[in-house]
Amino acid sequence: MTIRDTDGLIDAGLLDPSDRARIDAVATRYAVALTPTMRTLIEAPDDPIARQFVPSTEELTTAPHEHPDPIGDDKFSPIKGVVHRYPDRALLKPLLLCPVYCRFCFRREHVGPDGGVLTAAELEAAYAWFAAHPEVREVILTGGDPLLLSPRRLAAIIATLSAMPHIETLRIHTRVPTTDPGRIDAALTEALVTDRSLWLVLHANHAREFSAEAKAALTRLRRAGVPLLGQSVLLRGVNDSAAALEALFRAMVASGVKPYYLHQLDAAPGTARFHVPIAEGQRLLAALRGRVTGLA
Ligand code: SF4
């Protein structure tokens, strides 16, 4: 069962009981979820897997530069569930549920178990917005995690967008294949079938996330013809060394996932413990050039 509260984390030996009250305060503000797959990958409290998902009392402190909407989604949202920041592409967020809740999430003020699922009327309004914007060639399904939708609902969204002549490309951003790999079944891969160009972008930050189950789920996606890209966030204590990034990118390539983005951390509230300065990120990437295959 997915752990969703302080007691569950204490029972699993991942939190000190003396922190109960303060962690409860964190969990009241920011959603908590740790799937069984991710739980089994944790080898010690505060290791690179635990650090991503186990809440910390440090989340109660908001640094002066941190902001509840750090990348300005709100400013670029013309209608509920849609973000249009660049001319040729726009986000569609059909739900705000995730399989896990990352402690560094840039949408942490919005994602959570309440789900934020667009109603049928809101989804219709979003479709109407896309239909009225022929300059938008690419739709990025994100959230939340779109692969938590039922295959039937996901297929309906993909079919509706694919029927719009100007939509050439669909992109789906997800952590499901590594955090809840059992969800990647035949019904879900069937839901991804479209004659448009569809890309799945896997969010993963550490090589250990590529468990045997995750690799099998990624193989099922590849066999279904879904091209896979990887996106990662540079995180202090998770992947902030050339060796950790090399292992991560090699694990992606070995799993058929082409590394695509390495993000600097967005300044969401209570995330300062993950911050890696930009100059350090640039040094790390420079250290990888020539050391790993260009695919990585
Ligand atoms: S899966 Fe993505 S949207 Fe969900 S908590 Fe993690 S970073 Fe945020």
Image (cartoon, rainbow, N blue to C red):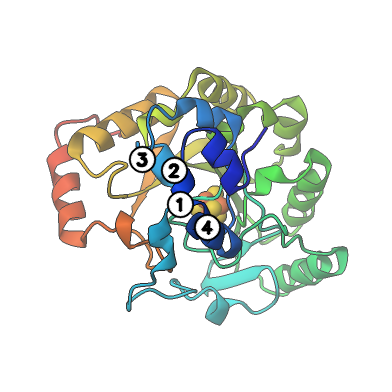
Q: CA distance from mark 3 to mark 1?
A: 14 Å
Q: Could you tell me the amino acid type at mark 4?
A: Ala
Quarter of the image where one finds residue 266: bottom left
Q: Earlier in the sequence, mark 2 or mark 3?
A: 2
The residue lying furthest to the front in this view is: 18
Q: CA distance from mark 4 to mark 2?
A: 11 Å
Q: Nearer the viewer, residue 56 or 265?
A: 56
Q: Nearer the viewer, mark 3 or mark 1?
A: 1
Q: Residue at x 54, y 81 (%)?
A: 75
Q: Could you tell me the amino acid type at mark 1?
A: Asp
| 1 and 4 marks in contact (CB < 8 Å) | yes
Q: Which mark is residue 16?
A: 2
Q: Could you tell me the amino acid type at mark 3?
A: Asp
Q: CA distance from mark 2 to mark 3?
A: 12 Å
Q: Earlier in the sequence, mark 4 or mark 2?
A: 2
Q: Which residue is mark 3?
A: 46
Residue 172: percent from left, percent from top: 59, 48
Q: Which residue is mark 4?
A: 21
